[in-house]
Amino acid sequence: MKLPLWLVTLVGFCGVLGWGSAAFSQKPSLPNDTGLLEPVTVKTDLYPLDADAKKEIDAALKVAGANHKHVLLVFGANWCYDCHVLDRALHEGEAGQIVKERFVLVHVDIGEGGKNLDLAKKYKTPLDKGVPAVAILRDDGELLYSSGDGEFESARTMMKKDLKAFLQRWKGN
């Protein structure tokens, strides 16, 4: 028996629709941490203007000491889109889990480029290479890492897997 062409086409089309919807309705078991860092909506309070960064770092060191964590300083500003992209990545996916478990995060506001320069100098984090800029401290305040070459300044082009590898390298015991 020969089936009409329109019937064969209709059955084939329905099969493709059924397979496609089944394939797309399945949720992945793990978050996809292989692509670029995700775009964000810029917040106006990521780096609070009235924050005392020195006090926040001191408090973070105490928390880090009590919980056997490192302190992750992120120098940046509310106007910096890449700072917002990095912040989102530090709170989501596998990178976010590492930060939650192994770091105490402190945002250090640079304002329009002239604020908290003493802290940037103290932690050997030159801001002339761009922001966000990152420093990692042991719980006793010893500097372990600083992004002296501007590694994070274009966070929007950073791969999730690279951020994860960086955090794993510096997370400590």
Image: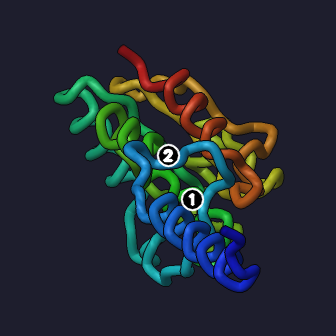
Q: Which mark is residue 116?
A: 1
Whether residue 103 sits left or right of residue 73 in the image: it is: left
Q: Quadrant of residue 61?
A: top left
Q: Quadrant of residue 13?
A: bottom right
Q: Nearer the viewer, residue 159 or 21?
A: 21
Report the Cα–Cα distance between label 2 and label 1: 12 Å
Q: Quadrant of residue 78?
A: bottom right
Vertical comparison of 45 with 16: above or below: below
- Tag 1, which secondary structure? loop
Whether residue 12 sits left or right of residue 47 in the image: it is: right
Q: Nearer the viewer, residue 169 or 117?
A: 169
* Disc with the residue nearer the chain's start (2 vs 1): 2
Which residue is the site of mark 2?
Answer: 73
* Quadrant of the frame with the N terminus: bottom right
- Which residue is at 39% across, 36% downward? 98
Residue 151 position within the rendered picture, expressed as x and y whole percent measured from the top left: 75, 42
- Which residue is at 59% across, 31% downward? 166
Any part of residue 122 in sight: no
Instruction: Indicate the amino acid at tag 1.
Output: Asn
Whether residue 131 sits left or right of residue 90 in the image: it is: right
- Which residue is at 59% across, 29% downward? 165
Any part of residue 3 in sight: yes
Residue 145 position within the rendered picture, expressed as x and y whole percent measured from the top left: 60, 28
Mark 2 vs mark 1: in front: 2
Q: Nearer the viewer, residue 63 or 152?
A: 152
Vertical comparison of 95 with 64: above or below: below
- Tag 2, which secondary structure? strand
Q: Nearer the viewer, residue 73 or 30?
A: 30
- Which residue is at 82% across, 51% downward? 129
Residue 9 position within the rendered picture, expressed as x and y whole percent measured from the top left: 70, 77
